[in-house]
Amino acid sequence: MKHILFGACVVFLSISSFAQKVDLDRFSFDYSYLKLPKEYIDPAKRTFGVRVETSKSLGIVTDVNQIYDRIRVGGFDKVSQNPTVGVEVQFNSFKILGYEIKERVEEKKDKDGRVTERKVYYWAEVKYSSDGNYAIMGPRTPTQKQAEAQAKEMEKNRFLQQANVSNESFKVMSGSTGSYSQTYKTSEFKNSMDVRDYYRDNQVLIREEITREWVNRTISTINQQLADLYGFDESKGRDHLWILDSKSHPEYPIQQEAIKAVKQLMTEMSAFRNIKVLEKNLGPVMSYFEELKRKYKGSDKREQKMRYSAYYNLAKLYYLLDRPDDSEKEALGLIQNGFDTSDGDMFVKMAKTLRDDLARQKMETRHFE
């Protein structure tokens, strides 16, 4: 009888333990917000201008008007005179230096290591040189070291001590758009003579393709630097929450409802839509995550994992809702919970960056009508 009772207890404990199993899994959703730039410019002064110079020998691939139209700064108006931010780009020269035929070998072997098939592929490696440069001119906030040096200089100069001098500096970011020797690889062929014929018959097309890549790469670099410094561009992507994936757990059904609600509601998030309605709609889900922290307050690792998911999900949602202070509060709770403190540290840094970005741009949100 004792053996039967013992066996029944073991089965009961096993079922009870299995029922409370806590496995967490990532469940993804979409987000959208405005990326905030490093530099602040008064909204009334957000203008930029572009000047493009190209060599006539480069042909239609470097059409000035097309390059001019493709350089942009999000949230800024393009003007022809007195821009706050100026861009100058030059494509000076391009030259094919020659080509060399390269080859690679593919071999298939049987289980004994004997070669059963051998194929050779050939291509032309074209060497070329390009020359050009660009400059981005606009107001830049000086670094702490530069500001201290400026202050010391003013202290030493009796005529500057009473002057109302702005700490905003006008700086130039410049770079080269080319170099002396670069390489371009053609398509592969099965015969070296086919490569020679292809290069001979398509030199003009190859030249245009290489030049087009050069121009596209330069424009991309300039636009990325403009966006980083000044532009307001939409940032879209996918993120995730940690949701219970243990079907036997009593919390599982409502967790599934929660993530489905988040997925559906977050489709309404747009950098160009007010976020207040979305924040209100997410309220019940966030209240549920808040409740989990109080419901599972034991020291058991399974309850610790439940609290971890609640803190993590709230920190993530508050961050995306442009509430860095609340996100940081949840991050500190995540650290105190102890299950994965590195995630808490990550959210603390994210909250600080967002708070600083919003303060610098004199904004309260990254979402606008």
Image (tube, rainbow, N blue to C red):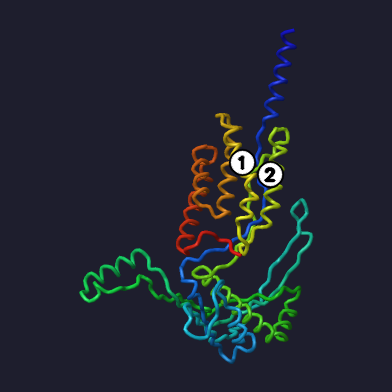
Residue positioned most to the bottom: 56
Q: Nearer the viewer, residue 327 or 284?
A: 284
Q: Quadrant of the N terminus?
A: top right
Residue 206, percent from left and from top: 67, 82
- Above or below residue 239? Residue 256 is above
Residue 63, percent from left and from top: 62, 87
Residue at 54% in and 59% down: 365
Q: Secondary structure at mark 2?
A: helix
Pointers 1 and 2 in contact (C-beta within 8 Å): yes
- Above or below residue 26? Residue 32 is below
Q: Secondary structure at mark 1?
A: helix
Q: How many numbered marks appear?
A: 2
Residue at 74% in and 74% down: 189
Q: Residues within 10 Å of mark 2 (few under 14, many from 20)?
A: some
| Res. 16 visible in picture | yes
**Residue that mark 1 sits on:** 289
Q: Quadrant of the C terminus?
A: bottom right
- Above or below residue 341? Residue 296 is above
**Residue that mark 2 sits on:** 258
Quadrant for residue 105, please give it: bottom right
Upstream in sequence: badge 1 or badge 2? 2
Mark 2: which amino acid? Answer: Ala
Mark 1: which amino acid? Answer: Phe
150 with respect to 283 (left or right): left
Quadrant for residue 148, please give it: bottom left
Residue positioned most to the top: 1
Residue at 27% in and 74% down: 163
> What distance separates the C-alpha of mark 1 from that of mark 2?
9 Å
